[in-house]
Amino acid sequence: MDMSWILIAVLTVLVAMVVLSYIVEALRSAPKRPETLVWAPRIPIEHVDLDGMRVRCIRTGVGPNLVLLHTLRTQLDIFEKIIPELEKRFTVHAFDYPGHGWSDIPKAAYAPEDFYQWTAAYLDRIDIRQATIVGISIGGTISLVLAARHNPRVTRVIAVNPYDYWPVGGIRKSSLAARLVLTPSGVPVLGATIMRLRNRFLSDRMSRLRLYLMAIIFSHSTVRENCII
């Protein structure tokens, strides 16, 4: 077969994939914002305004302030297994980062600095004082950065598996499989197409798996009232 025809065939397939991805995305129905937490209907859902963005958050319990910061591509519900225990001894705060969970989706680069600024703004907005910040993955990185910048609202930090960013670090360094899965997502056009065609069935169940792993790794006994950095 002539190479020109092969090239045309490849380009046709790529264009077809892009078009199909937009069709799939357009046909995906918009989810309805839940009015209550499925795992704790008694905890009221609140919202705060961060520079025009409507951000979902919760506050529950009595005691010293404890702020929980979730991972990328998850939401505050990742802590559903431990919040009922933590709220017995702490005033627990959690929120969905912009572009995550049920918070508004901003036009942003989602660079590390965005998350640092969003979290600092959230702490200011709820006017929290003397808080212990507990974060996992990017949440752990955020907590460490807030402490390093001497944020006056942060008194203690617990960073669980803090995330280090590619190319210096990141999950892609962990294995060949991680590189094969994540590297294409960064390719212009192709990456966005792959994400639009992502398997929703697998995505939802992987999120559920992360919830259960968090319940195992991050037991409520990890946090103490007198914890220190």
Image (cartoon, rainbow, N blue to C red):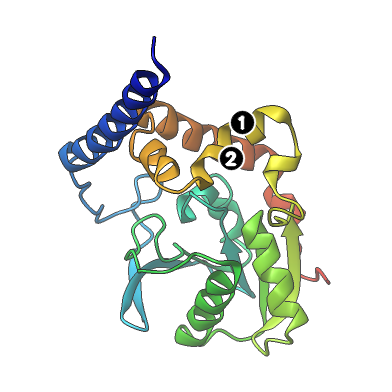
Reading the image, the residue beneath label 1 is 180
Q: Residue at x 33, y 52 (%)?
A: 41
Residues packed near mark 1 inside 10 Å, few (<14), some (14 to 19) or many (20 plus): few
- Tell me the quarter of the image containing the N terminus: top left
Residue most extreme to the top: 1
Q: Position of residue 130 (x, y in %)?
A: 67, 84
Reading the image, the residue beneath label 2 is 183
Q: Residue at x 73, y 84 (%)?
A: 149
Nearest to the observer: residue 113 or residue 131 = 113
Nearest to the observer: residue 104 or residue 216 = 104
- Residue 133 appears in the picture as rendered: no
**What distance separates the C-alpha of mark 1 from that of mark 2?**
6 Å
Q: Residue at x 55, y 44 (%)?
A: 81
- Residue 132 appears in the picture as rendered: yes
Q: Quadrant of the rendered structure where residue 180 is?
A: top right
**Mark 2 and mark 1 in contact (Cβ < 8 Å)?**
yes
Q: Name the amino acid type tagged 2.
A: Thr
Q: Position of residue 142 (x, y in %)?
A: 65, 68
Local secondary structure at mark 2 = helix
Q: Is residue 167 left or right of residue 110?
A: right
Q: Name the amino acid type tagged 1.
A: Leu
Vertical side of 101 occupied by 187: above or below: above
Nearest to the observer: residue 93 or residue 50 = 50
Q: Residue at x 53, y 81 (%)?
A: 123
Local secondary structure at mark 1 = helix
Q: Is residue 18 left or right of residue 212?
A: left
Residue most extreme to the right: 228
- Tell me the quarter of the image containing the C terminus: bottom right
Vertical side of 94 occupied by 24: above or below: above
Residues packed near mark 2 inside 10 Å, few (<14), some (14 to 19) or many (20 plus): few
Nearest to the observer: residue 100 or residue 215 = 100
